[in-house]
Amino acid sequence: MNLRRQISEQEKQEIIKRHTRDGILRCFVDNHPIENLEEVEYHHIRPFCEDGPTNLDNIAPVCKEHHRRIRTLSLIEFRDKMKLDRFFEEEYRKSDGVRLDDVFAYLVGESGYGKVVQWERLDRQIKLYWEGDEPEILPLYQCPVTGFEYFYALVPVKHLKNDTELQPRPLEPPRMWELYRHFLRYTQLAPAVCRLVDNQIMLFDGQHKTAAQIWAGRCRVECKVYLDPDKRVIKETVLAAHDKLRQMPFYTSTLISRYSSLFKEDWEEYMERPGTKSEKGFVQFLIKAKGVPKGEAMKRLRAAIENDILEDPENKLQEYIAEKNKSRKNPLTIYAVQQTFLKEFIAPPPLEVEFESTQDFRRQEKKNLIKLLNLIVDKTLSGRWNPEAKNEAHHTAERIYAAGALKAWVPMLRAVIAAKLNLVDDEEKNRVFFRQIDDETFASVIEPVVNRLFSHKIWLDPDPEIDANLRVNNVDHVKQFFKSRGLSAQWLLGIEDD
Ligand SMILES: [Zn+2]
């Protein structure tokens, strides 16, 4: 958010002075030097609307580029988002996913976590000798069903470790980011769950909230810790709990709660029913058991799938959608995005495939589409869309996103990507992204198509007739016009030359 109150020249000088070390002024976001003082802008560290005080301690200098990208985040959130993105980018390259231990290692160092803790039993209590801290005596409880003993503690991060055997799943970046933002403002409701075995506290449930809270700066995490329980029984318990809550990854609570609480209740009720679960099954459940009209049921499902993509913090297109960024004139509306990118690249719901079965690629589809959208943003909008400047770059962007143009090139792009991925079957062509597409295929097959599309001469040609024709809100007209200027699926495929 921008500063609502103007700050005086004198105050600016004072802020610059405070953030200058060894003669170098640094951007608050990632500490890079700002050499040109004209590039300096000012932003609240804690947001104004959340009672962040408007005193000079709460204002920091930010470079123009970062300031533009902050949008509705507070400065601390934005800085941490950048850090989180970089972290996941680096870690992802190293292995097949990021785990809680990687977060620990990143934030507190390889030797800074997973330390053994000495402890002793005192009747119905446990005495814990935290490293570098006073010993702590806590009550021991017993589970009436299994007889397992456990205690509750605020466990220092240095004594925590991921329980790789019981929790092999990697962290999901969007979930961690959502929870991170949540924990900047709210308390932790349910504790994370661990087991204490051979002086080691291993966390097997609640890894996202733990990672998020540590990222948010907490150094202790609220935990329920079992005292060396029967591993086999715990394993079964975890499996049973997760089996019952199978809505986990794609249909996460974040997705459903965003849509409506009513929908969430219906969803949970459906998931608790016996039998295999699918989108189609859910729509039928809404119609038959809940009396929701078919059109409405379909609308709800589609909205949930679409919002999940539109609201994803990784999705850079958001910034250019009018309803999502009201601070300037934007090239797109939610409706236009639905009618083009979402319509073309999402396998039409409701699907019959069982959730989370090996045939369910909704998550990959989302990932693929966001990757494509971000690529398109980088090529056509980022640093180009600038309604005030009215320069050539902006003019090109306006052409690309003119109502008719968008409706014509997005389906063309989809068709060519389908061809390049060797999809021949009609059903497969309707779900180009509903599959695993690895980074290499993306870079070698899809990226060149996008590059070729936006390298076409039609986008730069000074002929004003082009603008008039691309604004015609009739897809057949624009397709014909494209063709008359040499832009066609054939050309995009590389079969025809310029
Ligand atoms: Zn900066």
Image (cartoon, rainbow, N blue to C red):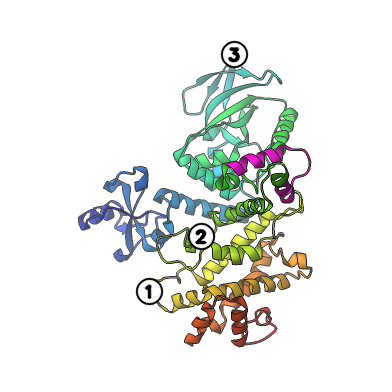
Lateral position of residue 34 relative to residue 480, left or right: left
Mark 3–mark 1 Cα distance, whole angstroms, equals 72 Å
Residue that label 3 marks:
124
Question: Badge 3 local density, few (<14 within 10 Å), some, or many (20+)?
Answer: few
Residue that label 1 marks:
389
* Nearest to viewer (mark 3 / mark 1): 1
Which kind of residue does numbered mark 3 sit on?
Arg
Mark 2–mark 1 Cα distance, whole angstroms, equals 21 Å
Lateral position of residue 331 relative to residue 256, left or right: left
Residue 115 image offset from top left, x and y in percent = 57, 33
Residue 18 image offset from top left, x and y in percent = 28, 51
Residue 409 image offset from top left, x and y in percent = 60, 74
Q: Which of marks 1 and 3 precedes in the sequence?
A: 3
Query: Residue visible at 34% across and 47% down?
Result: 48
Residue 72 visible in image = yes
**Span shown in magenta:** 262-284
